[in-house]
Amino acid sequence: PVRFAMFSGDVNQDGTVDATDLSLVDNDAVIFVTGYVSTDLNGDNFVDATDFSIADNNASNFVGVIRP
């Protein structure tokens, strides 16, 4: 069977979830950014600790893009 997975947290679209992405999410969470922004990882139109948690979990698991 064919299986697919999607991870969230690659805010700057460089192919890996890393400290740069965490920094971007953290900066937006500190200043309470709202709306349709790339750092809103869970889609609730508010950047907060929940979004940081998603990025942090994926960064600690070294999530990255694998392309054929």
Image: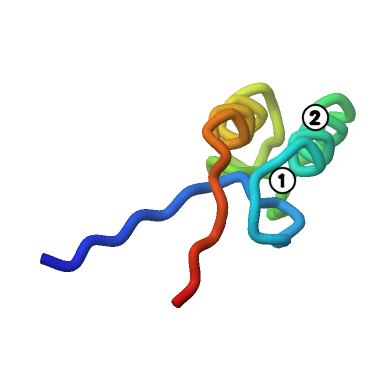
Which residue of the protein is positioned furthest toward the bottom in this rendering?
A: 68
Picture coordinates of residue 28, whole percent (x, y): 83, 36
Earlier residue among tags 2 and 1: 2
Secondary structure under badge 1? loop
Q: Which mark is residue 26?
A: 2
Decide: is 51 above or below 68: above
Residue at image coords 57%, 39%: 62
Q: Residues within 10 Å of mark 2 (few under 14, many from 20)?
A: many
Q: Quadrant of residue 59?
A: top right
Identify which residue, 43 or 64, lies in the foreground. 64
Picture coordinates of residue 10, whole percent (x, y): 65, 51
Identify which residue, 47 or 5, lies in the foreground. 5
**What is the three-letter code of the residue carrying label 2?**
Asp
Residue at image coords 89%, 29%: 31
Picture coordinates of residue 61, whole percent (x, y): 52, 33
Q: Quadrant of residue 15?
A: bottom right
Say left or right for 42 vs 3. Answer: right
Query: What is the spatial separation of the Cα atoms under label 2 and label 1, in whole angstroms?
Result: 9 Å
Pointer 1 residue? 39
Picture coordinates of residue 12, whole percent (x, y): 76, 56
**What is the three-letter code of the residue carrying label 1?**
Thr
Residue at image coords 80%, 29%: 26
Q: Residues within 10 Å of mark 1 (few under 14, many from 20)?
A: many
